[in-house]
Amino acid sequence: MPLVGFPRILLIGVLVFCLFTGVSFFRQHPQGRLPNFWAHQAANANENSPFSFKPSPGKFKDIRNSTLGFQKIFLINLPERPDKFDQFAIAASFTGFTYDLIEGVKGADVQNKSLPALKGLPATERARNNIVGCWRAHLNAARTIVRNGLSSALIIEDDADWDVYIKDQLQEFAAGSQFLSGVTAGPKPHSPYGDDWDLLWLGHCGAQFTPGDKLQWAIANDATVPEPNRRANFGGEPDIAAAGYDNSTRVVFRTSAGACTYSYALSYRGARRYLRNQALLETFTPIDLGISKMCKSKNTEFKCFAPFPQLIDSHKAAGRMSRDSDIAKYSADDVREHGFTFNIVHSIRLNIDSLLADENAPIQRQWPNDPEVIGPPRPRAMVQSQD
């Protein structure tokens, strides 16, 4: 029976009210409802920030938005691993960023004729499928950037972990990437990270200083830098001490090598170069090593900037270790008693339960017995040039 008279008018009134309040809400909060925790952090940023320096709002304020200063964030997740997506969603909600999904790819669905090279593929079908699927998923993310004309995007894997203070860290990192990409006093760059870079390798498991490169950007007295024995960096750590820095310093530099793709950002220019390079491979290479070669190659200009210690890493959750990876193999009996993440002091993953109980709960350090970085207020940044 159609609604008539007063009930119909009442229903229309309710709909109009809901529409009005919804529009009003999103005018005030263009990224949707921020979690109470992040709103609290933002309101008290000066008190809660682990940094003594507060970046000037003009150049770096966009980093505190819902895409961390990039045009988009893409999450790579295999459809058969909704458990990883679930936990990532909780972590991202407390950090206050949004993302679009790039579905992971099963290597078995990628035909050999679509690969740039067959030389270099693993001999076993399982190993081949693991490497090819990962490679194709990351290329799909890069292709999405190019197809949609995005100025930049952050690509992040579903088991990634980061510091609760990631937005503070990225503001500090951006000062370094602007410096390395040639931003000096003058007009504000289009990207808060500078406008002359191809890849920002924020979540790696191995990066090195470029030989002969005399400029690095040092973030001194950084309370989010872990003790040396809490770090993991395959291929050896960049020699911070030899560069004149102490163990409370994070360094931003142009990297000549890297490994692991926990998270990295591509500019539009970088995404196009990335896709073209991978299409011309003469020997098939896992995606992280392929990126590493691009960063190192003198034949193609591909500017890669990275921090050390890294800002994003892979979380190893408590429980069955077989749930960790879709590539590595574990026994069904292998169990991890306590979760952990290398390199991350205030792990968002390890703070989730306390924040769910009380969004204003104190942030816990992953290694509470390690000495905390304490020092006098520092200047805006320290740049060291080696002679």
Image (cartoon, rainbow, N blue to C red):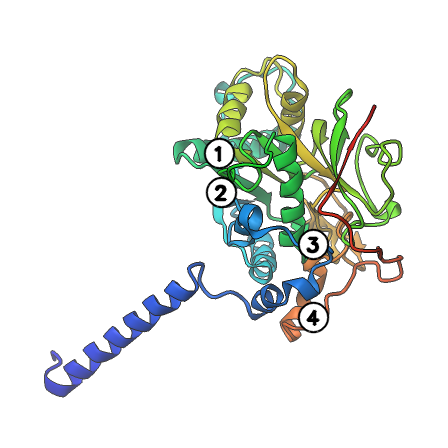
The kind of residue tagged 1 is Asn
Quadrant placement of the C terminus: top right
Nearer-N-terminus badge (1/2)? 2
Name the element at disc 2.
Answer: strand
Which residue shows up at 59% across the image and 44% down it?
A: 156
Amino acid type indicated by mark 2: Ile
Do the residues bearing badges 1 and 2 touch, measured as CB atoms within 8 Å? Answer: yes
Earlier residue among tags 1 and 3: 1
Residue at numbered disc 2: 102
Give the percent coordinates (x, y) of residue 5.
10, 85
Q: Distance between the residues labelled 1 and 2?
A: 7 Å
Identify the disc placed on residue 101: none
Camera-side mark, 4 or 2:
4
Q: Crowdedness of circle 2 by 10 Å Cα count: few (<14), some, many (20+)?
A: many
Amino acid at circle 4: Ser
> According to the image, label 4 marks what residue?
354
- How would you rate the neighbour count of disc 1 (Cα within 10 Å): few for under 14, some for 14-19, many for 20 or more? some
- Identity, as a three-letter code, of the amino acid under mark 3: Asp
Identify whether 322 is placed above or below 363. above
Q: Which mark is residue 163?
A: 3
Q: Marks 4 and 2, Cα distance to the nearest angstrom?
A: 30 Å
SS assignment at label 3: loop
- Residue 375 placed where, x, y %? 84, 55
**Residue 140 numbered tag:** 1
